[in-house]
Image (cartoon, helix red, strand yellow):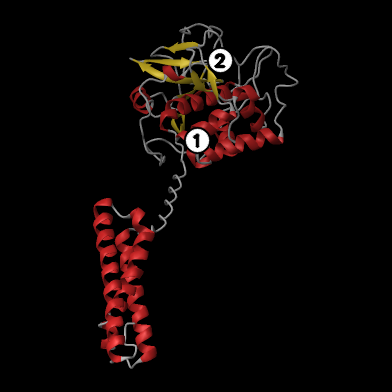
Amino acid sequence: MKNLILKPRSTDWIKGISSPIVFKAVTDNWVTHLEFFETQKDSFETNGCVLFTTQESFDAQMDALWPTIPLAVQAQITSMGFMQTGTDGQLHFHSSPRFLQIQTGNGYNGNAVQDGWDAIRTYGCLPWADLPYDDTITSETYLTGVTPTLLAKAASFLALIGGKNAIQYHWLVNGTPKNIPQIAQSLPQAPLCLGVVVAGNWNQVSPSPDPVSGADPGHCIMNYAVVGETLSCLDHYVPFEKILDAGYPVNYVFQGIVSPIFAPPLPAPLPPSPTPVQESNWLTQVGLWIQNILSQLKAENLQSNKMNTVNYSLLKSKTFWSAVLLFVFNGFNAISGSVPSEYSVPINFILTAAVGYFHLSGVNAAAVSSASLGKAVSGQ
């Protein structure tokens, strides 16, 4: 079995030496986020252990981070088909390792552990259902099926989680013996991708005897927990759970880290300014009438006299005041429906009485003056 190609690069980050990735714990239990157990060898051998390990680590992280993802983004990811029912009967994030294997361009020739993460950083992910792997898929069709529509969908997903900067990686161990305390300290941030040597006794829960230390690893699996000095791992061959004992050599430990970057929500639009309500009550209308009366008096006075001249005979005329009160009376009747009854009844009574009094007195006074002077007087 030689599915893993060792290809450390001088530009790769090393945790604790050159890596700028800030440690941030996500969960202390990755088991609840491992709900899909798939084999890399069904109808044929895919040689895709690196891509299955990448997909399993990426999916576990997306699943653990799900409660922190904005609801609008959750809805978009769900609508794309990424959420699938796991072995526990609940929905979990589930992407396609087949898509990653196609996009690396390496076919069935194996991959470096960085290749799967670089593929996600470059192209994004697709739901498992878009490019699945089961016994209906042949070796002739496995590396096909990526259409322009699917490429656009994967790119859209990548943009949703913040682009390539949302996905980083570094080495913990790159050719030296494993460091259990370092592994245990790093696991809460993300599962680990292990490069391991596989012998003929591999397909058992605890492979033994241990292979010779120093041999080049040819297989990649995912480490999700440390128990004492043993490593609990998820493999892609039955049995899926593998437990590597304290003496099992693991000289290559790699960690891909998902840190979604979401755009800040748009500010809520400001509510429309309320339309000014023109105050309309009976007191306002009375004030408008008074202004109207004064305006008319002023206009009449300007037309007939100088501004500082007062027509005292007009102001002493009961007939004039009768006309004024009649004007007010008629105006009051127009708005009496909006005036509270405790005001309208007495006001109506006073105005009616005043109009009658001034009208009758004015007529009688004019008649008396006319009879005594033999000419019309002001107010008649």
Instruction: State the image quarter where residue 51 is shown.
Output: top right
Instruction: State the image quarter where residue 305 is shown.
Output: bottom left
Circle 2 SS class: loop
Please tell me which residue is depicted at 52% across the width and 8% down the height of the picture. 239
Above or below for 88 versus 289? above
Q: Is residue 113 visible?
A: no
In the image shown, does 159 or 219 lie closer to the viewer?
Answer: 159
Above or below for 13 versus 326? above
Q: Is residue 360 visible?
A: yes
Circle 2 packing at 10 Å, graded few (<14), some (14-19), many (20+), is many
In the image shown, does 289 or 23 lie closer to the viewer?
Answer: 289
Closer mark to the observer between disc 1 and disc 2: 1
Residue 236, which numbered label? 2
The image position of residue 35, as x and y in percent, is: 49, 16
Q: Is residue 53 left or right of residue 142?
A: left
The image position of residue 270, as x and y in percent, is: 42, 52
The image position of residue 327, as x and y in percent, is: 36, 70
- For badge 1, the amino acid type reads Val
The image position of residue 204, as x and y in percent, is: 50, 6
Please tell me which residue is depicted at 45% across the width and 20% down the height of the picture. 33
Circle 1 SS class: helix
Circle 1 packing at 10 Å, graded few (<14), some (14-19), many (20+), is some
Please tell me which residue is depicted at 32% across the width and 91% down the height of the picture. 374
Quadrant in which the N terminus is drawn: top right
In the image shown, does 242 or 85 lie closer to the viewer?
Answer: 85
Disc 1 designates what residue?
73
